[in-house]
């Protein structure tokens, strides 16, 4: 059975949350190994070395060689628990692998031909990856590190399904075995964002309109004199009228001159 990574571990005797917390402070990662028709065993791994191996994508989808003392066990990674905000591995689960027993694993999808696809190159579409990995079942010797997905033949508005994937010999997709065929990739036209129409404040617009229509001095505006010409100031006299002061003076002078003197008209 071909393996890609080797991990050195040790058996763990202490149990409980308190013991796990102390081990993490010492740079260790609590782990468990189960399956393979044998009892589960608790293990310890070095955090620094484990983190370096887990930076490789293949670590999650290949057969691992787990060495404890002078014993070696083939296993696969089944679960990882990480700290919510620190770069720390809290716990890890491994499953024993037997050569004659099928396993289920999640393997990544590697897409190729996206730039050459007719729907993208000639029809202006956009390629969307609906799924980036899938769950497969197979014997350990047939487990692929990844599954290649060729999308170069896709046209606009076409969808690539799970049933369209080419799988290595002996590998089956779990979803298809359950009767569920799902999309993997598609090409569609890019969405056109609608231009936003500015929202007009109705109250402000109405106030501005009222202020413009009823400007001071305008016909019908407050303070405008009846019959005043457009643009005339409030209280202004009609065109051609004499100033008020001159009119008053003229009236007084005319009164004196028009009054008869005593003795006028007597002989």
Image (tube, grey):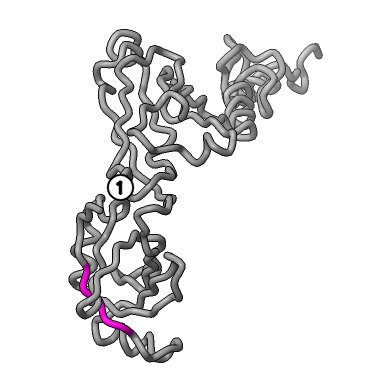
Q: Residue at x 31, y 77 (%)?
A: 29
Residue 39 pos. (x, y %): 45, 75
Picture coordinates of residue 115 (x, y %)? 25, 20
Q: Is residue 140 left or right of residue 263?
A: left
Magenta part of the chain? 7-11
| Residue situated in front as seen by the camera: 224 or 87 | 87
Q: Of helix, strand and loop, which one carries label 1?
A: helix
**Residue ID at (38%, 37%):** 170
> In terms of secondary structure, what is the magenta stretch mainly?
strand
Q: Which residue is mark 1?
A: 141
Nearest the camera: 90 or 3?
3
| Position of 91 relative to 122 (above/below) | below
Q: Judge left or right: residue 184 versus residue 49.
A: right
Q: Residues within 10 Å of mark 1 (few under 14, many from 20)?
A: some
Q: Which residue is found at the position 29% from the left and 67% from the top?
A: 73
In which quadrant of the rendered view does residue 89 lie? bottom left
Work out whether 33 lies above or below 253: below
In this rendering, is residue 111 above or below 83?
Answer: above
Q: Is residue 107 left or right of residue 172?
A: left
Q: Position of residue 252 (x, y in %)?
A: 66, 25
Q: Is residue 50 rendered magenta in the image?
A: no
| Residue positioned most to the front | 100
Q: How many marks?
A: 1
**Identity of the residue furthest to the right in this view:** 266
């Amino acid at each position: 059975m071909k393996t890609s990574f080797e991990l050195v571990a040790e058996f763990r005797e202490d149990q409980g949350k308190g013991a796990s917390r102390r081990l993490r402070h010492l740079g260790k990662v609590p782990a468990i190994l189960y399956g393979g028709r044998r009892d589960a065993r608790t293990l310890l791994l070095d955090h620094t070395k484990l983190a370096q191996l887990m930076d490789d994508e293949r670590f999650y989808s290949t057969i691992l060689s787990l060495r404890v003392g002078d014993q070696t066990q083939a296993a696969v990674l089944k679960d990882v628990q990480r700290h919510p905000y620190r770069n720390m591995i809290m716990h890890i689960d491994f499953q024993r692998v037997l050569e004659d027993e099928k396993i289920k694993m999640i393997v990544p999808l590697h897409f190729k031909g996206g730039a050459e696809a007719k729907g993208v190159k000639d029809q202006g579409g956009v390629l969307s990856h609906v799924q980036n990995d899938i769950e497969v079942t197979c014997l350990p010797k047939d487990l692929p590190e990844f599954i290649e997905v060729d999308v170069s033949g896709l046209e606009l508005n076409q969808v690539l399904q799970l049933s369209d994937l080419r799988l290595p010999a002996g590998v089956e997709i779990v979803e298809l075995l359950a009767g569920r065929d799902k999309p993997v990739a598609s090409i569609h036209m890019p969405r056109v964002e609608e231009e936003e129409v500015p929202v007009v404040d109705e109250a402000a617009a109405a106030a501005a309109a009222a202020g413009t229509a009823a400007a001071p001095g305008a016909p019908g505006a407050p303070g405008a004199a009846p019959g005043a010409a457009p643009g005339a100031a409030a209280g202004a006299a009609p065109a051609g009228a004499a100033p008020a002061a001159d009119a008053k003076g003229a009236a007084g002078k005319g009164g004196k001159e028009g009054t008869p003197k005593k003795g006028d008209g007597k002989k």
